[in-house]
Image (spheres, rainbow, N blue to C red):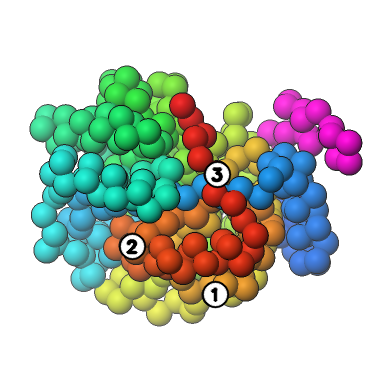
Amino acid sequence: MTLLKPGPTSKTVETRHDWTLSEIQFLLEKSLMDLLWEAQTVHRQANPGYKVQLASLLSVKTGGCEEDCSYCSQSIHNSSDITNFSDLAVQEVLQKAKVAKEAGADRFCMGWAWREIRDGKPFESMLQMVRGVRRLGMEACVTAGMLTDNQASQLAEAGLTAYNHNLDTSPENYDSIISTRTYQERLETLEKARSAGITLCTGGIIGLGESVTDRASMLKVLANMDPHPESVPINALVAVEGTPLEDMPSVDPLEMVRMVAAARILMPFSRVRLSAGREQLGEEAQVLCFLAGADSIFYGDTLLTTSNPEVKSDRELLAKAGLQVNHKFHE
């Protein structure tokens, strides 16, 4: 158990790893006003200052993925598969990282549409990219599917800050979304990264047709990890034509607010990232998400293959909300 020493006007913030499904579902179904009050109370105590981290995300290898994720435009199983992009070279990626840093990003995330990391030249290039991003003074995050213990160790030695591998949904709903990789394999991937000393970036997506109980179940898996994931992305489905979920309705923005608030209460010291689907939220809902405990956004024009608010509009939004940019989380 981790306790935060109380300040002059705060109470102790308790970190738990034994949340029950009923407790979490109760949070998600609470009166929105009460939920926001509780989330903001925790957020102000555990993460004072209302500072937001800016992260930039780049697709290094786009399309042609062997997984059959129902939401993804990069799966070879979906007619939306994007295959007209060539893999980016090391120097091209590092140049984009430099541009992202100059625009204010503190964390640079790189994605490969792979089922698992491939040894040889592609992996050596990945290691060079990680080293280069770290030399720029930025956090480096990689998402590239499953990995081996040896690959995790090499990534750690290269200076990788975080490995992203989302759970996507609940264990109970998982098989209706993906059949080519098991939930247990996702958990094992996270454990390999953690064992190598790499911080975890793992969250999920709402709007996949799941129930409130499914959302609570996914949060239960995350909140009962010990330690909690350092980074928890909360995504809303961006329905893409050519995927099995292309006709899913848009997520109610207030449902995103509820997920952010619950994540903040359950994992007080984790960085809760407002991720995919943010463009569809509008300014008001984004501000409510910040109020609920979101303290990071993906910053830039694209999120892998979906659009994202532009840098200028993000800067204006942060200024309107009175939010400051936080830098230098991991030296």
The amino acid pointed to by label 2 is Thr
Please report contact status of discs 3 and 1: CB closer than 8 Å, yes or no: no
Give the SS element for disc 1. helix
* Quadrant the N terminus occupies: top right
Query: Is tag 3's residue or tag 2's residue first in the polypeptide sequence?
Result: 2
Question: Which residue is the site of mark 3?
Answer: 326
Q: Is residue 206 left or right of residue 35?
A: left
The amino acid pointed to by label 1 is Gly
Q: Is residue 41 left or right of residue 88?
A: right
Question: Which residue is the site of mark 1?
Answer: 282
Mark 2, other Cα within 10 Å: few <14 / some 14–19 / many ≥20: some
The image shows residue 61 at horizontal and vertical percentages of: 20, 50
Residue positioned 69% across, 57% down in the render: 292
Q: Is residue 56 above or below residue 85?
A: above
Query: Is tag 3's residue or tag 1's residue first in the polypeptide sequence?
Result: 1
Q: Is residue 190 visible?
A: no
Stretch in magenta: 1-23
Give the SS element for disc 2. strand
The front one of 154 and 174 is 154
Question: Which residue is the site of mark 2?
Answer: 302
Q: CA distance from mark 3 to mark 2?
A: 21 Å
Give the SS element for disc 3. loop
